[in-house]
Image (tube, rainbow, N blue to C red):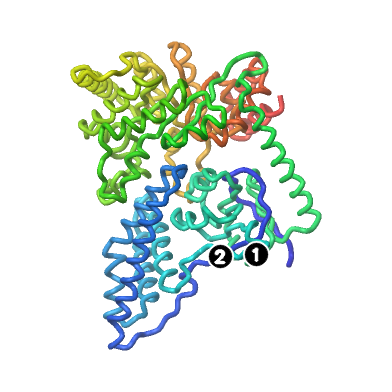
């Protein structure tokens, strides 16, 4: 078999070498035949049973969702469950069986093709791209009908290749990816996808190499082919020569050795070569993540995504957690961090994190009723959460972070509700930190351009780079077809970040970055040179960033970072950032 190389988008770092396990789209293998009149109702029941089984499968996935899974994952599963319940999927194919006598698979594919054609005609780009979700749901039903629902191969004790399995697919839904989480897979390759596609998010959360946007990888790579994934370069090599295989095995061994070496930095203070201390904190979803953060040497929790406490109930009747229940969870995290600060972000739902997908009616949810807008529209829910967070502050250092603020009245209303929650606790005789710091997420360009409005009202700022990039560049960050436009080094993005850091410094308040940029070692020197002194990231990224910090001299990198900020041409910015890595 000839060797060939594919180039795509690097989404999760590292090198994997293994055997390809192909996931073939079920729609390609669908048989077409007519059923006799007396068999029509049996065929209808066969499709109904398959849909019900997929429903049960999605519910089971919800129940077994790993606690360290990205928050988006549960939302993706909810969206698929909602699509599956839509009459256009659950009922229309039944009519096709009854009227045209198509077999179940043919009827479902016919309906999906018709729906896909309708989606192609929609002018709104966001809605048009939801076609992929419908096709992924149909794939799951087809696989049940065809008896191929089990995506991962069965374990066999004597299978020497299974520990080296690399999943290759045209696309793979988050729900399907979960089938592999307990298997010995070591990498993902998909034809489609981008930096923030579902596959990319899960791969990073699992800390395994992955490359996406490989165009025809699933057609060119064959089952059991040897495959190399270079997750740093976004390169996939199929059937490598012995020499290439040897070279990559040597690189892989060097990377593993470097990872082990990183563990020795756990207790090393994060200080630059010129003696400037840098605060490195962890992003968490649940209190159970705290030991992982401590193991990585985190100086605190820079972002506790509290929405995970709420979203975890989306499959269970959407009951909101009570004040006491929330308090226990927040307190658990505060106690677990043993005196280190815990920054709790208030409920940030909406867009790709719907609390209840059945009520998801906004034409463009990313710009709709989400985060603080939702909380201010649901004051009792917001007050309940604020009281719970305040009560937790009696057990350790807690900072309260408000997401997606843009208007002065939103800031003022939020602060007024915090005061209202404090008054209620005083009246009830509950203890809390009267001086609890309150900060704002800077994740909307309007906020970054109106910083004086924020620094005079808030105690600290935290830059959410994922949303800041999304809103600055008008890119849906989970839409793979515009993923190539998602660029953290766009001059507009860099200017907004630099403005925020400078405004915080001038006002004498802390500024942190808690988005993906904080954990990207390629950007650590740039952010330090821009003046950033607080980073919060996934615990798995923390030691790599610390290693980068230990090798930095601010007097050397600051002028180079200013050179990056003065550049407006992409090539000049890329070159200046590359030079930062070697000085």
Q: Residue at x 39, y 75 (%)?
A: 105
**Quarter-wise, where is residue 429 in the image?**
top left
> Where is residue 388 shown, x and y percent of the image?
29, 28
Pointer 1 residue: 159
Residue 440 percent across, percent down from the top left: 37, 24
Tell me the quarter of the image containing the N terminus. bottom right
From where the camera sits, is residue 500 visible? no
Q: How many callouts does the rendering have?
A: 2
SS category of the residue bearing label 1: loop
Q: Residues within 10 Å of mark 2 (few under 14, many from 20)?
A: few
Work out whether residue 173 or residue 148 is closer to the camera in this orientation and state it. 148
Tell which of 23 and 341 is nearer to you.
341
Q: Position of residue 449 (x, y in %)?
A: 40, 23
Farthest residue to the left: give it. 427
* Residue at x 31% of width, y 71% of height: 48
Horizontally, residue 94 falls left or right of residue 252, namely left
Q: Mark 1 Cα within 10 Å, few/some/many (few <14, many 20+)?
A: few
The answer to whether mark 1 and mark 2 are in CB contact below 8 A is yes
Q: Earlier in the sequence, mark 1 or mark 2?
A: 2
Identify residue for label 2: 153
Position of 3 relative to 550 (above/below):
below
Q: Is residue 131 above or below residue 394?
A: below
Query: Regarding mark 2 in the picture, which secondary structure is present there?
Result: loop
Give the farthest residue toward the right: 243
Of labels 1 and 2, the one closer to you: 1
Residue shown at 59% from the left, 27% from the top: 567
Q: Measured from the top left, where is residue 191 in percent x and y?
A: 55, 57
């Amino acid at each position: 078999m000839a060797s060939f190389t594919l180039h795509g988008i690097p989404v999760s770092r590292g090198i994997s070498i293994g055997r390809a396990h192909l996931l073939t789209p079920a729609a390609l293998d669908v048989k077409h035949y007519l059923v006799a009149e007396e068999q029509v109702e049996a065929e209808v029941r066969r499709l109904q049973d398959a849909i019900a089984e997929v429903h049960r499968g999605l519910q089971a996935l919800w129940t077994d969702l790993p606690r360290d899974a990205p928050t988006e994952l549960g939302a993706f599963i909810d969206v698929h469950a909602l699509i599956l319940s839509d009459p256009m999927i659950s009922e229309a194919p039944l009519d096709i069986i009854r009227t045209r006598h198509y077999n179940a698979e043919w009827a479902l594919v016919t309906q999906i093709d018709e729906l896909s054609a309708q989606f192609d005609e929609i002018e709104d780009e966001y809605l048009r791209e939801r076609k992929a979700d419908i096709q992924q749901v149909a794939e799951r039903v087809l696989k049940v009908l065809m008896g191929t629902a089990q995506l991962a191969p069965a374990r066999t004790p004597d299978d020497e290749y299974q520990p080296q399995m690399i999943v290759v697919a045209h696309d793979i839904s988050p729900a399907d990816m979960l089938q592999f989480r307990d298997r010995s897979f070591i990498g993902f390759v998909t034809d489609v996808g981008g930096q923030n596609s579902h596959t990319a998010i899960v791969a990073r959360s699992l800390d395994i190499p992955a490359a996406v946007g490989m165009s025809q990888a699933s057609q060119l790579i064959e089952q059991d082919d040897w495959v190399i994934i270079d997750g740093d370069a976004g390169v996939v090599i199929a059937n490598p020569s012995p020499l290439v295989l040897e070279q990559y095995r040597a690189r892989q061994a060097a990377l593993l050795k470097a990872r082990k070496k990183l563990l020795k930095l756990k207790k090393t203070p994060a200080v630059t070569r010129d003696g400037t201390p840098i605060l490195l904190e962890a992003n968490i979803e649940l209190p159970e993540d705290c030991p992982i953060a401590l193991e990585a040497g985190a100086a605190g929790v820079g972002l506790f995504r509290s929405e995970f406490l709420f979203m975890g109930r989306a499959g269970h009747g959407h009951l909101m957690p009570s004040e006491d229940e929330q308090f226990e969870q927040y307190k658990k995290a505060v106690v677990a961090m043993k005196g280190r600060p815990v920054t709790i972000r208030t409920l940030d739902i909406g867009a790709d994190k719907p609390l209840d997908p059945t009520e998801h009616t906004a034409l463009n949810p990313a710009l709709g009723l989400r985060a603080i807008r939702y909380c201010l529209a649901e004051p009792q829910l917001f007050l309940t959460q604020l009281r719970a967070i305040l009560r937790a502050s009696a057990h350790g250092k807690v900072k309260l972070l408000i997401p997606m603020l843009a208007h002065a009245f939103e800031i003022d209303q939020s602060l007024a509700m915090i005061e209202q929650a404090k008054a209620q606790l005083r009246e009830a005789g509950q203890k809390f930190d009267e001086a609890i710091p309150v900060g704002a997420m800077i994740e909307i360009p309007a906020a970054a351009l109106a910083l004086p409005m924020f620094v005079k009202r808030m105690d600290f700022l935290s830059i959410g780079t994922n949303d800041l990039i999304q809103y600055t560049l008008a890119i849906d960050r989970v839409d793979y077809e515009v993923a190539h436009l998602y660029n953290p080094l766009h001059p507009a993005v860099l200017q907004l970040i630099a403005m925020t850091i400078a405004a915080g410094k001038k006002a004498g308040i802390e500024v942190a970055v808690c988005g993906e940029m904080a954990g990207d070692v390629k950007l650590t020197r740039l952010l330090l040179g821009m003046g950033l002194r607080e980073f919060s990231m996934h615990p798995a990224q923390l030691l790599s960033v610390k290693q980068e910090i230990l090798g930095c001299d601010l007097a050397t990198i600051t002028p180079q970072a200013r050179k990056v900020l003065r550049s407006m041409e992409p090539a000049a910015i890329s070159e200046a950032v590359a030079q930062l890595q070697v000085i």
